[in-house]
Image (cartoon, helix red, strand yellow):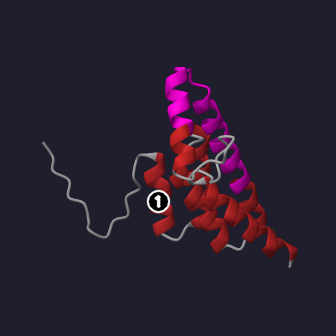
């Protein structure tokens, strides 16, 4: 059996796609990192971390139009996910208790409509407004 010693200075790319994206980002190869994060998002459209990092990369490169597109994609994916999660059939008792709890804690209005956005949607909508202002300048 042959033993292979790796040099401590040798650069080795990780195998998993998300790890590759992180590796490229650490190596300051932002183009490759962005492409890898895009692939992660294509494979898993609900990967919050990949969306966040991709937004940060575009922000660093001052690519605000690309950042806005990614924010819109992320918001759309998560809104659809939350919308589908609400369609899960529940008993009437659970639904009425949930609405009563939300109203009593101030998370919903009198009609039961949520007053606050779920995370990460609130953060992304705030960032979207900032990007839109930068694009106006």
Name the residue at the bottom extreme: 137
Quadrant of the image occupied by residue 81: top right
Quadrant of the image occupied by residue 64: bottom right
Q: Is residue 132 left or right of residue 52?
A: right
18 relative to 43, above or below: below
Q: How far across and down, in percent of the image, does residue 68 sit?
A: 75, 60
Name the residue at the left extreme: 1
17 relative to 27, above or below: above
Frontmost residue, 4 versus 9? 9
Residue 40, visible in the rendered structure: no
Report the residue at 56% width, 42% height from top: 46
Frontmost residue, 89 versus 96? 96
Q: How far across and down, in percent of the image, does residue 6 sit?
A: 25, 60
Frontmost residue, 30 versus 72? 72
Q: In the structure shown, which secondary structural element does the residue marked by tag 1 occupy?
A: helix
**The C terminus sits in image quarter:** bottom right
Q: Main secondary structure of the magenta part?
A: helix
Q: Is residue 110 left or right of residue 46?
A: right
**The N terminus sits in image quarter:** top left
Query: Label 1 belongs to which residue?
Result: 22
Q: How many marks?
A: 1
Q: Is residue 77 left or right of residue 8?
A: right
Report the residue at 40% width, 47% height from top: 15
Q: Which residues are magenta?
A: 71-99
């Amino acid at each position: 059996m042959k033993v292979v010693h790796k040099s401590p200075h040798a650069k080795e790319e990780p195998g998993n796609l998300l790890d590759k994206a992180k590796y490229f980002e650490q190596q300051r190869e932002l183009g490759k990192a962005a492409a890898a994060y895009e692939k992660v998002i294509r494979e898993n459209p609900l990967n919050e971390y990949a969306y966040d990092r991709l937004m940060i990369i575009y922000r660093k490169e001052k690519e605000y139009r690309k950042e806005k597109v990614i924010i819109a994609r992320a918001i759309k994916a998560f809104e659809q996910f939350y919308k589908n999660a609400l369609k899960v059939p529940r008993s009437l008792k659970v639904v009425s208790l949930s609405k009563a709890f939300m109203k009593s804690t101030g998370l919903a209005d009198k009609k039961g409509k949520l007053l606050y956005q779920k995370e990460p949607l609130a953060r992304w909508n705030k960032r979207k407004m900032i990007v839109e202002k930068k694009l106006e300048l």
